[in-house]
Image (cartoon, grey):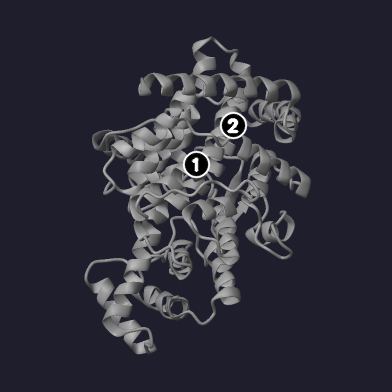
Amino acid sequence: MVRMMRMLVDQGRRTSQNLQWVRHLTNNTDLKSRLEQLIPEEQARLKDLKSKYGKNSLGDTTVDMAIGGMRGIKGMMWETSLLDAEEGIRFRNMTIPECQAKLPAAMPKGEPLPEGLFWLLVTGEVPTKEQVSALTQEFQDRSQIPRHVFDVLDALPKTAHPMTQFTAGILALQTESEFARAYAKGIDKRKYWEPTYEDSMNLIARLPEIAAYVYRRTYKGGETIAANSTLDYAANFAHMLGYEDPKFHELMRLYLSIHSDHEGGNVSAHTVHLVGSALSDPYLSVAAGMNGLAGPLHGLANQEVLRWIEDIVREIGTDVTTEQLKEFIWKTLKSGKVVPGYGHAVLRKTDPRYTCQREFALKHLPNDPMFQMVSKLYEVVPPILLELGKVKNPWPNVDAHSGVLLQYYGLKEANYYTVLFGVSRTMGVLSQLIWDRAFGLPIERPKSMTIEWIENFCRKQATK
């Protein structure tokens, strides 16, 4: 009987969601209306690009690139952000300081609202406060989660890694996919972007509650906190986690904004693009990307930084001298380990995402011992890495700072940090996936080679 009642409730919700989609299609939200105007213009622009420059070379591919993680290969179009080795990330051609200055905030001179950054990523335009408020409301309207999603999460042991639970929750939501239903019915491929947009908006809207549910069941005895409809996206997420400090809400706004996108070549973004190119719906695509984000070389890095700093504190304390720090760093390097939080595959300067977090700390927690440790490391680590001579970028990246900020406000469960990253990154990858569908981009299929093929090819080239 209970199962039957749940089925009836879920069926009713699904019917309501289908009607909601129709309502958006006919009346339009501001964001979707703007997209409908932009898409024909950008489609024409891409067609012209292919016609004029389709045969142009974007650069050579070396053997080192092919066997070295495809570093530096120009092989993907990604509209929402671009990473410059010297300057850092630009979101739709806007730097982080520009985003902080121009995007709507919850308070005067406050951090940008993630809803505003999402609008920017999707449209390339800075939204008004009214447009951001409408988007906040739309996310709230779309946030209802079917009961079976929580049943799936409750079937997992509470000892399961938070990212395992988070990804399972996303997959459980796939039953609600508008794209999967539309594709099964034979939707015109020129309209693929529309149900992709609906799925993307629904998934972004529902992720904070799923992420908060994972946190509360894993670390807080399963006692959940209901959403607060008066709060913006980031503040409501922090509230459902159990944190009410307005400064932590500001940190969450900053965190969700700066982690949202980092062009398309990183593991999580590329995975979503790759899986999405097979016309997998946004739920399947994002779940795949989150599994990539869970890797120690990608999204787990921030918790490794925090643990490494905690190791320093345990061994030599917080009131450390420069010489003591140098000794500990050299010990780390000589043991065959890397200094976590330093270096980047593309960047050759201090990550601007690190810089804006440092500015936040200087403003809100300048005397925190852990922040002061991070500052000391900023002074000591780069010269040592330069002396080592093997590191192209000795400067700190985003992960060198975020864990210390989170633990200051009481969120000390380091295993959970990647879930926060995942909620943020979903905004960026789904902004691009909507455009992938609008552009009609094909399935991704690069050429692979064997060692023997590369050897033979290179020998032939050498004899020419």
**x and y, in percent, of residue 77 in the image:** 56, 37
Q: Position of residue 149 (x, y in %)?
A: 41, 33
Taking depth in this image into account, of 347 and 81 the one nearest to the observer is: 81
Task: Identify the residue at the far front of this view.
Answer: 1
Residue 200 x/y as whole percent: 56, 33
Mark 2: secondary structure:
helix
Seen at 78% across and 45% down, the residue is 130
Callout 1: helix, strand or loop? Answer: helix
Q: Which amino acid type is marked by label 1?
A: Leu
In the shown orientation, is residue 260 left or right of residue 71?
A: right
Q: Position of residue 390 (x, y in %)?
A: 35, 67
Quadrant of image for the N terminus = top left
Whichever of callouts 2 and 1 sits on the residue coming sooner in the sequence is 1
Outermost residue on the top side: it is 186
Contact (Cβ within 8 Å) of mark 2 with mark 1? no
Q: Closer to us: mark 2 or mark 1?
A: 1
Residue tagged 1: 207
Amino acid beneath label 2: Ile
Whether residue 334 appears in this view of the structure is yes
Label 2: few (<14), some (14–19) or many (≥20) C-alpha neighbours in 10 Å = many
Say which residue appears at 33% left-offset and 67% top-offset: 307
The C terminus sits in image quarter: top left
Could you say which disc has been placed on residue 223 in the image? none
Left or right of residue 24: residue 157:
left
Which of the 4 image quadrants contains residue 287?
A: top left
Gap in Å between the C-alphas at discs 2 and 1? 18 Å
Q: Nearer the viewer, residue 183 or 345?
A: 183
Read off the residue under disc 2.
Answer: 434
Left or right, 208 with reference to 162? right
